[in-house]
Image (tube, rainbow, N blue to C red):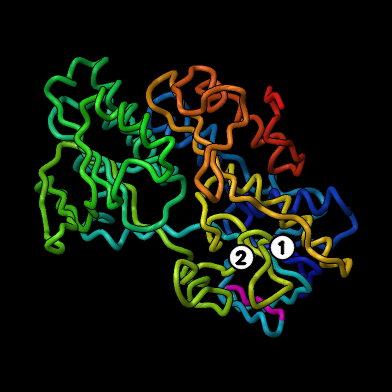
Amino acid sequence: MTNSTHHQILIIGGGSAGLTVASQLLAANKSLDVAIIEPSEKHYYQPAWTLVGGGVFAAEDTMKPEQECVPSGASWIKAYCQEFNPDNNQVTTRDGAVITYDYLVVCPGIQLDWHLVEGLPETLGKNGVCSNYLYEQAPKTWEIIRNFQGGTAIFTYPNTPIKCAGAPQKIMYLADETFRKNGVRDRSKILYCTAGGGIFGVPAYAKPLMEIVDRKTIDLKVKHNLKAINGERKEATFDVTTDAGVESVTIPYDMIHVTPPMSAPDFIKQSPLAGTEGPAKGWVEVDKFTLQHKRYPNVFSLGDASSLPTSKTAAAVRSEAPVVASNLLLLMDGKSLTANYDGYACCPLVTGYGKVIFAEFDYEKKPTPTFPLDPTQERYSMWLLKRYGLPFLYWNRMIKGKQFERSFLAKKP
């Protein structure tokens, strides 16, 4: 905790985005005064939680003390951000401290709104209800999957933006293979209940995913938004959108993996930094190319809480962070902002043990493959990258500010 009440650059959030930007700024100029407001003492590599839920990654290997991750030269303010006053370049913390800044980077992550599904908070982790979206819950997902004796297994996707849009189905494919290995698949029914209109939002990858769904005899139910769970009765109730309107449908289950509704943190939604209409409503409103705030030029945002119309993944942050760092330094020098983000995001779609479709795409939802391979195919090499390569790069390069190109392996021109 620093005693200073003013910092040249103040970063809200010490997750993937905040640490990466801070590290890159200090790598460019170690004399910068950079402070990070982050309440958590633990830092998590969340992309591995699917593999924790699938029984191939230990939960403890996804966590390190935050202190070990904060870059040398940055001040860590261990507090909760509560209020923004961008007209006066001020931030107020939950404990009442007022911190001023010259430049602000906002990246506090996303909020999990468990309470928006009636009955979910009370039954999470029991009555066959699991979710990979919490560190403590991911191991329980594996416990439920490996002990499953047959029946109906439901996997849900809500009607809100979420972090990693592919994660809800990744765990489903691992569960399918585990059920087969344990000899219970022939007496099991798997339902993928998504509030969306299809399996995945990028057409080039939706096609092979639908082939996998068909091959695995998974029942895809679109426009199904989970609204309530009765853990005692083991019943899930959905709002189902049809041509005639919205109707309530209740489905009995034996296990259910829930992806909760998500939103920007409340202190973002209630702040002057939030957009007030359209897709940016409630999110930090920034230019999608420069990542500069549309109304406050000394404010930037990236990651899950931003209004950027792309997937909310660590891979997206990896491409967003150098744009923020570069443009912030240019702004400080009184120069025009020239760094631009093309919307690059990556979702390693785990389709089974040893199989991954390495989905990469941009704002236009066009495939942007890093490797000289057909990106729509399941590959063991991409499984190895997901399982071993990406965690290594995350801990040892990304959050340490050591920028690497997307062609860090073997892309040919």
Q: What residue is pinned by disc 2? A: 79
Which of the labelled discs sits on residue 1, or is there none? 1
Q: Identify residue type, mark 1.
A: Met
Q: In the structure shown, which secondary structural element does the residue marked by tag 2 occupy?
A: loop
Residue at point 43% right, 62% down? 263
Q: Quadrant of the C terminus?
A: top right
Whole-percent x and y of residue 15?
Answer: 60, 51
Which region is colored magenta?
Answer: 89-93
Whole-percent x, y for residue 172 in the image: 31, 33
Q: Residue at x 44, y 22 (%)?
A: 378
Which is nearer the N-term, disc 2 or disc 1?
1
Give the left or right position of residue 342, taking residue 304 as reference: right
| Quadrant where the image shows the N terminus | bottom right
Taking the image as shown, residue 80 lies to the left or right of residue 236, namely right
Residue type at the position of mark 2: Ala
Percent from the top left, x then y, of residue 376? 46, 28
Foreground of the two, 43 or 28: 28
Position of residue 37 relative to residue 399, above or below, is below
Q: Is residue 90 magenta?
A: yes
Relative image position of residue 298 (x, y in whole percent): 74, 72
Tag 1 secondary structure = loop
Compared with 329, 236 (above or below) is above
Tell me, yes or no, whether the two marked residues, 2 and 1, touch with CB atoms within 8 Å: yes
Marking on residue 182: none
Picture residue at 12% right of the left edge, 60% below the top:
247
Residue 291 falls in image quadrant:
bottom right
* In the depicted structure, whether residue 212 falls above or below residue 13: above
384 and 266: which is toward the camera: 384
Regarding residue 264, the answer to whether it shows in the image is yes
Whether residue 97 is visible: no
Q: Does 280 lie within the magenta span? A: no
Q: State the residue in front, 258 or 290.
A: 290
